[in-house]
Image: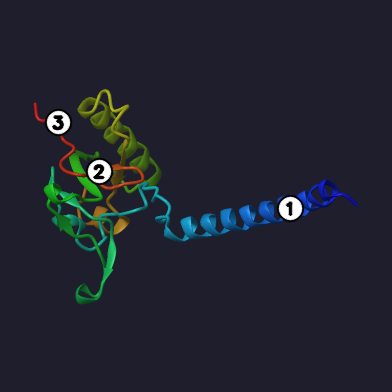
Amino acid sequence: MTNQDTVTGQLPRRSLRGVVALLCTAGLLATMAGSTMSAPAVVKDETFVDAQTPGILHIEGGECFDDPAHLPEAGGVVVRYRPCALGADNQVYGFVHADDTNWDPVALREFAWSACRQMFTSTWPDDTGQALRFYPVLPTRETWADGDRDVMCVVYRFGGRLTGSTLPSW
């Protein structure tokens, strides 16, 4: 056996060990990256927050607020106002008033999405680069019975927080 045969015979084993080491390192890095990744983006729809979510009725047009969170000092899940300049999860961009009819959740939901969409597209006619989305906050059966006909239209950034007010300064 020559020296060249010995070297040639060892190359596949060394190459195999290198490939195994590379794969183990890649797997470890993927696991570490996965453990530090943020939670998946929240998809917000008409059921995300409603008129009976504690704190939501204290939010005015143009104001920002964070997603509902459990606050022991408040006794449960609440929505909290947050100054837009500090960054927030959501911003109210308007209100629409539903017709005073009998309670019809399907018709109310359709009206709310349509009216908020129309207000959204007129406020941000070219929102292609901002990645903004919207959702309506609806009255509930109980608040409707008390005369609540207002739908709150809310904007948010999918997959991230707002970094200030989103409202255009005309």
x then y, percent, for residue 137: 28, 48
Amino acid carrying label 3: it is Pro
Q: Earlier in the sequence, mark 3 or mark 2?
A: 2
Q: Tell me the CA gap for discs 3 and 2.
A: 15 Å
| Whether label 3 touches label 2, CB < 8 Å | no
Residue corresponding to mark 3:
168
Describe residue 1's horizontal placement relative to residue 30 as left or right: right
Relative side of 98 to 106, left or right = left
Q: Does residue 113 sit above or below 142 in this rendering?
A: above
> Which circle, 3 or 2, is nearer the viewer?
3
The label shown at residue 16 is 1
Q: Earlier in the sequence, mark 3 or mark 1?
A: 1
Mark 2 surroundings: few (<14), some (14-19) or many (≥20) residues within 10 A: many
Tell me which residue sits at (21%, 51%) in the image.
Answer: 88
Query: Which residue type carries mark 1?
Result: Leu
Q: Position of residue 149 (x, y in %)?
A: 22, 46
Along the viewing direction, whichever of 95 and 108 lies nearer the viewer: 95
Q: Residue at x 57, y 53 (%)?
A: 26
x%, y% of residue 51? 25, 55
Residue drawn at x 26%, y 60% is 52
Residue at the front extreme of this rendering: 2
Q: Nearer the viewer, residue 20 or 81?
A: 20
Q: Secondary structure at mark 3?
A: loop
Percent position (x, y) of residue 33?
47, 55
Provide the residue designation for mark 2: 154
